[in-house]
Amino acid sequence: MTSPSLWIHPALILFAGAILLPLIPGRFKKAWLLLMPTLVFLRVMGLEHGVYGTVPFLDMTLTFGRVDRLSQVFGYIMSLMCLLSSLYGLHVRRDTEHIAAWLYVTGSLGVIYAGDYFVLFLFWEFMAFSSVFLIWFRGREQSLWAGYRYLLVHVFGGVLLLAGIVLRWNATGEIAFGPVGVDSPSAATWLIMLGFILNAAVPPLHAWLPDAYSEATVTGAVFLCAFTTKTAVYALCRGFAGMEILVALGAVMAVYGVVYAVLENDARKLLAYHIISQVGYMVVGVGLGTAMAINGACAHAFAHILYKGLLFMGTGAVLHMTGESRFSHLGGLYRKMPWAFVFTLIGGLSISAFPLFSGFVSKSMIVAAGFTEHQYWAAFFLMLASSGTFLHTGLKVPYFIWFGKNNCTPETWERAKEAPWNMNAAMVVASILCVFIGCYTPYLYNLLPYPVDYQPYTAYHVSETLQILLFTALGFFLFLDKLRPEAKISLDMDWFYRMGARAFMWLARKPVQEADDQVGEVYRFGGLVPLMAAARFSAWFDWHAIDSVVDGFARLVRRFGGEVRKLQSDQLQISILYAFLAVGAMVGWYILSY
Amino acid sequence: MKIVALIDFLKKHIGRVRIVCLYSLLALVVIDWLFVDKSPAHTGPEHYVAFWALFGFVSCVAIIFLSKWYGYLGILTREDYYDEP
């Protein structure tokens, strides 16, 4: 059904809010920063299922507003997270940072409500180009380069996506944003999938995420951790439910992120690696493709956005206050920032899927769907990864920031104190939601796209989870020495393009420049010198040969003219005689020649 | 601040906290063994006593050691690795 009346897209409200922000007087700015996301959230809640905002374009019909249960669950959590993140970043005075963040969310909402692949692509790119500013605004030199890398990788992904969309359109004439033939995948299917899984940070296309998110601004990272990867999960749910290869990719990425988290020294980079691990669960859910698995993927995305946001808020508060996010330069902060510790711990317990916390009711749906579909190795991989999740996010992050050896410099220790009220308020709301979702399952389950027939709170499941997590904690404390932070970084797939770019620059500076110099030299010796010699020769030839011929001829003519002049005496009859002789000679020559 | 006082209290009695935690772990395994219905299990090994406890512990140890081994293969490197020489 198409509504002929005016339909206001939720993204439009945020877009207008972002554009008008610089015009809002200073004293109303904070109210505006909370009002607009609230209006967006209310607008999302007020949407009714249907198709809206259709625009004829060339011989196609573009659809900006397709509202159904799947788009609503993502629209709901994205707009809620926008409100929480805006509250968290309320102290930020730079308008442009708020504008970039809101335009980024605009892109995400645009994708979620897009009804066709062209509109999706439009907003997809909008997200990439607006979010990069959240990295650049950190202001460090590393952030500048990380931003460029982020943008280049996303542009590459966008090109793959567009190629897939156009191929599909060309082959089938179809542009609707729906399943793209997962049973008999064509080149278009693979290209669109590559575009999506690049944004979902599926290895080996993942390195942009930890690289960029750890370099983003404090508030920027809170926005970034929610929108790009989960919008990609939404797109995968829509287009690739049941694509079997995603089960394997998801299981591998769940463990991949955990392995890198062991090595990581930067708290925010560790959390970024854990996004990869957690999105792995969702990708497995999409690959399984059953109603329960898709429900699980959506539920986990919903819960993940909140607890990962909370974790980035907690570690961001530490970074904001102390200027430090490396474990090797932190420690023992519980006396200085106890509330940030409590909130981060709640985030850690939620992501680890402790009973009564949000991850417990969402993650287990995907694992259960894996077992039900007899994908045992994938399900056990996910169980293994959940041990790793608690190990790092539930234990390593809180322990090495708030407990453990105090590695703070005197300046860091001096600066450390509780975060501003707005940061704490956002963390309080996110914490309450994490616990609420974990305790009252109908809140989340009623939002899911399919009816839910799943009960997480069985004795077996609670006991199983507690055993895994608590014995992981035992392992953590027994091998604590092995996990002590080291002031090092770990190399990842970005090595290839970072060093590749460096190799390219070296190639440009050294061999290509050298070759250019050589060619220049060859030109000088082989081209310019012979040319000059040739020029000199031609000058000489001109002077001595041509000129002498011409001059000689001229001299001859002059001499001849002189002789002729001598003939021209005053005596006319002699002149006439010469003339006759000449005419006679000519006539004679004429007659003789015939 | 009550949180700080609580943490200080626990740190002061860390020996006792450790003992309580270890007994809790034992209790968890025993309760699981004696009282928990194993019918929802999907695979055979899940019926063994303390299967998930062992799974959790072994997973944790495996992740720590395998990751460290991987890191020392050359993945872990100095912080200024990417700085221009």
Image (cartoon, coloured by chain):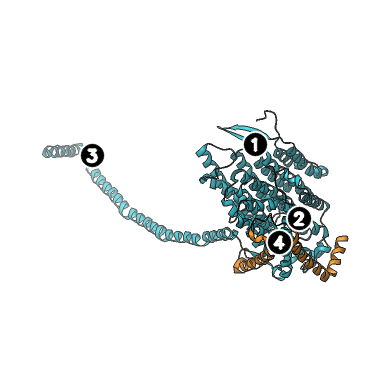
Chain colours: A cyan, B orange
Amino acid beneath label 2: Pro
Q: Earlier in the sequence, mark 4 or mark 1?
A: 1
- Spatial CA distance of label 3 from label 4 is 138 Å
Q: Is residue B24 above or below residue A302?
A: below
Helix, strand or loop for disc 1: strand
Amino acid beneath label 1: Phe
Q: Earlier in the sequence, mark 3 or mark 4?
A: 4
Q: Chain of mark 2?
A: A
Residue for badge 4: A468
**Residue A144 appears in the picture as rendered:** no
Amino acid beneath label 4: Ile
Residue for badge 1: A64
Q: Chain of mark 4?
A: A
Q: Is residue A502 above or below residue A74?
A: below
Depth order, front residue of A113/A166: A113
Q: Which residue occupies the extreme top position in the image?
A: A4
- Nearest to viewer (mark 2 / mark 1): 2
